Image (tube, rainbow, N blue to C red):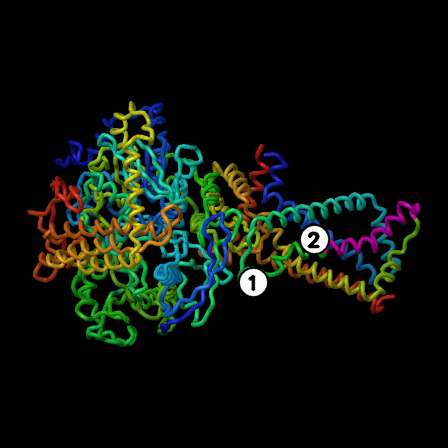
Amino acid sequence: MEHYNMNLTLKIWRQANSGAKGSFETYQVKDISSEMSFLEMFDVLNEQLIAENKEPIAFDHDCREGICGMCSMYINGQPHGPWKQNTTCQLHMRAFKDGDTIVVEPWRSRAFPVIKDLVVDRTAFDRIIQAGGYISVDTGNAQDANALPVPKKDADNAFLAAACIGCGACVAACKNGSAMLFVGAKVSQLALLPQGKPERETRVLNMVAQMDKEGFGNCTNTYACEAECPKGISVANIARLNLEYIHAGLNSE
Amino acid sequence: MTWKQFFSASVGKKFTVALTGIFLILFLIVHAGVNSAIFVGRDDFNNIAHFMSHNYIVRILEIGLFVGIFLHIIQALIVWRQNAAARPVGYHMSKANKNSTWYSRSMGLLGTLILLFLIMHMSHFFVGTKVALYLEDDAPHDLYEKMREVFSNGYIVIIYLISLVALFWHLMHGFQSAFQTLGLNHKRFTPLIKTIGVGYTIIITLLFASMPLAFYFKWIE
Amino acid sequence: MSLDAKIPQGNMSEKWSAYKGNVKLVNPANKRKIEIVVIGTGLAGASAAASLGELGYKVKAFCFQDSPRRAHSIAAQGGINAAKNYQNDGDSVYRLFYDTVKGGDYRAREANVYRLAEVSAAIIDQCVAQGVPFAREYGGLLSNRSFGGTQVQRTFYAAGQTGQQLLLGAYSALERQVALGNVTMYSRHEMLDIVKIDGKARGIIARNLVSGKLERHFGHAVLLCSGGYGNVFYLSTNAMGSNVTAAWKAHRNGAYFGNPCFTQIHPTCIPVSGDHQSKLTLMSESLRNDGRIWVPKAKNDNRKGKDIPEDERDYYLERRYPAFGNLVPRDVASRAAKERCDAGYGVGTTKMAVYLDFADAIKRYGKIEAGKNGIINADQDTIIRLGKDVVKEKYGNLFDMYEKITGENPYETPMRIYPAVHYTMGGLWVDYELQTTVPGLYALGEANFSDHGANRLGASALMQGLADGYFVIPYTIGNYLSNEIATASIPVSHPAFEAAEKSVQDRLNHLIQINGTESVESYHKKLGKIMWDKCGMARNEQGLREAIAEIRALRESFWSNVKIPGRVDEMNNELDKAGRVADFLELGELMCMDALDRKESCGGHFREESQTPDGEAQRDDENYSYVAAWELTGNNQWTLHKEKLQFEIVKPTQRSYK
């Protein structure tokens, strides 16, 4: 692959804090290498801003290897940018060409209020997990790990659901701001495993109730979440959540 | 959990939409099937129409149909309003076409078009039938003639055809979406459901479209 | 102060059970009154906070990320070891213990390692019960693989995302305790100081990273589970936010720092592509099971890797270490790659990389597949196609990641790899109970020094983090807290809290008022370069002395010329970074001092003055069989305390992989 350098125009959402009114600012960056990651390009821009006595852009990031789920950014109309099954930190500048204009916005959702610039508050996801995204087993209570065989197919499907990194791209992509893929993935993972069975009914009911309380929208099956999920989590997990919900709802007293 | 809790949760609301949707999908089969009798003959059609408006079972089912349509609309409107509120600040730039189809994102709009059409459609055919039945002491009512009269107007035919386009796309998403909502997403069954959905949608809309066209272009007497 | 490791008496295999049987307990009614502060929510922190919450303590957990689930344990790929012996291949607690002590080049404390091996099996049970989806066989039982050159299959894994799955398991246990009200979670909070009252750790000063406000939090005990300090090198496989600040504040408050120079350089990472590089990405060690490492035989060979004929390639690991070949331990593989590149045989544009080639593996697997499918005399294209499918199934996600980052297709051209800083074996000195030299202050996981000696074996970091959090601290902390039941919660208006908060506030104000000309990032990069060049894969006396002088000068420059925009009382990422880099600038000097003191080569620490005639690391057990525990005695002045290592069971021998 040939390397090249590029000059870019960046239109980036700036917002001083959660209460402030934000707006777009335009910046120019020069000699960006095609080998840089998107966030390294932001590092360059921030160094430039600091040198110009301006405030650098706040954005969330941590592992920069596509697994912690902390990076966000709605890049040119898509969460995590143009590459499929990819996070912003793994997006590389090869995806762009000299002279491009790139628009960068924060995740937009009532449940993810903007904290500053491109940083949003995703603690709603933690509260959904608190509502039931676990198996109640105190440390030391476990039986031998091989005492309970799990069919390989179920274990594999549980793993695929558990691969969710909790980044919130599903919510950002969904026209309804729905969190069903995130919740569906966790409900599915635990529903597929025998260990999760005892609590499966209360789990799905409580997690859905919390999801609604947080102000996420309702799923209308556009499947934008699946298309934009960096880990390719399937909407089959949403169907499984629906089924779990029917089962639990009808079974509850 | 109370029934109210069950159905007022986000997932529960969607069950209502999906279940009533499937009910309406079934209704459309009956509706298209019965109406297709116009291609058999005026008297056959009118006889069936008479049966449909007088049989008690059908009349009870008809109430169910109205309840279904009403719930489908109400729940969908609540969902639509809540969804609009879930993103108070929109995106400056959105490439939604990269991740979803336009019609899956436009069910509210398509549904509204269908609702407006329904108002006109009922005033054309349903009101007359009921007036004859209840207010005019079960006077004879030639529904076939009524159809010919309505569909002789080119503008109305065009409105019907446009509405069928809306119905087409509404069903293109709605058919398989209903099954997803009810929890059916399976490697083998889902492709089958999707194929049946497309086939159903094409056949139903073509059948309905053929009726005003047949009257307007006088393919049938 | 003399170091007492508090190792229980008795046979090695009975120490832990004897300890558990005699340790003092806190009764449930008293637990409710005791508060514990936990810093960090990785495997060690999340598991400790959850387990202590379950026991009934009142726990406050802190992380600087937006959610506890982001901690960098999540990035571990390969797996977790446990002495389950499910494969019936001769594994045992003893063997895991032995391998770990030997792998650590005999610089770990035997009793701690033995306990680690003992509790390893229970970790797997606990994780499975939590719903961690480990890989399974068709019969529904757990699958194991061999990892990092061990002779038994004891590694449990979940594809290449084992760390993620284990952390999400611990995170879910933590969130459950949050829901039950036993744990209060403080995310986007950074600990900026320890508060000591009457010599005991009694709380922390934390900064709310959103509002910029300082907060005081009381705890009867404080647990540091804040990870390693690899980011002192600027470039490492650590997350961008990983830092030493919590451990360093503890050190400044009297906790000794153990073996700071022991750093693990992982051999298989994606090489640096340019000055813009902000972090390095690991390619799992498992790739060395099938990939062959080589460089061209000629210097400055500019041909493409696949154009270089077989007889012009130098498979230097297979040449130097015929017995282990490409599977030599991490430290050996890393040094060998550096040696070749330094000698001018490196590849790629920067010449600081070697090839990891799958062409042979593809052919080998292709032939096996062709045989399985009954294809007789399969042509080359068919073999390669079938072989690629096998390789894709085994390593597909890693190959995809490589292609995203480099833009090169590793199925077609050999991967380029180079060693990168990955893990720090050093950390706060702790005794058998994981308590630092400050009473009431504990260190768990990568933040302590205890279990990996001078080199960590693959798949044992996850094991240690969870062992400390789930199965060690819940017992050992009781021994301290049982004496604290009479201590009522100390109000945070106490003068000690007041003074600590003021000193933190002053430091923040100072940093922001410097208003110089150079960014925090530029200082961090310069520090990283000094550390990598002079305290990296190979160290020598002259280089280390230079490094110390350079770091001191750089630190002075930092405190007079750093430029931090924005204010203290708001979200300010640059200020957050500045505080961390300021601490790295102190730690760097200590690491060099420690490396200077240790005139032997062992594990990840290679002193050029101490090597065998054929260039291998030469350990010196007579003079250096100790843990170096450094006490801060003044501003950047340290005193060395030595904890002599006693080997009751494993007799140190020179490692050989020839």
Which image quadrant for residue B195?
bottom right
The magenta stretch is B114-138
| Marks 2/1: CA–CA distance | 27 Å
Q: Label 1's element?
A: helix
Identify the main secondary structure in magenta.
helix
Q: Is residue B179 left or right of residue A123?
A: right
Name the residue beneath numbered marker 1.
B97
Q: Is residue B118 magenta?
A: yes
Of circles 2 and 1, the one toward us is 1
Q: Quadrant of the C terminus of chain C?
A: bottom left
Of residues C489 and B110, the one nearer the viewer is C489
Hey, what amino acid is under mark 1?
Answer: Asn
Mark 2, Cα crowd under 10 Å, few <14 / some 14-19 / many 20+, is some
Q: Is residue C301 left or right of residue B44?
A: left
Which image quadrant for residue A142?
top left
Hey, what amino acid is under mark 2?
Answer: Ile
Can residue C158 be seen by looking at this rendering?
A: yes
Q: Which mark is residue B25?
A: 2
Which image quadrant for residue A9?
bottom left
Q: Chain of mark 1?
A: B
Label whose residue precedes the other's in the sequence (2 or 1): 2
- Looking at the picture, how far across and down is residue C635, in whole percent? 18, 45
- Looking at the picture, how far across and down is residue C408, in whole percent? 36, 69
Can residue C133 be seen by looking at this rendering?
A: no
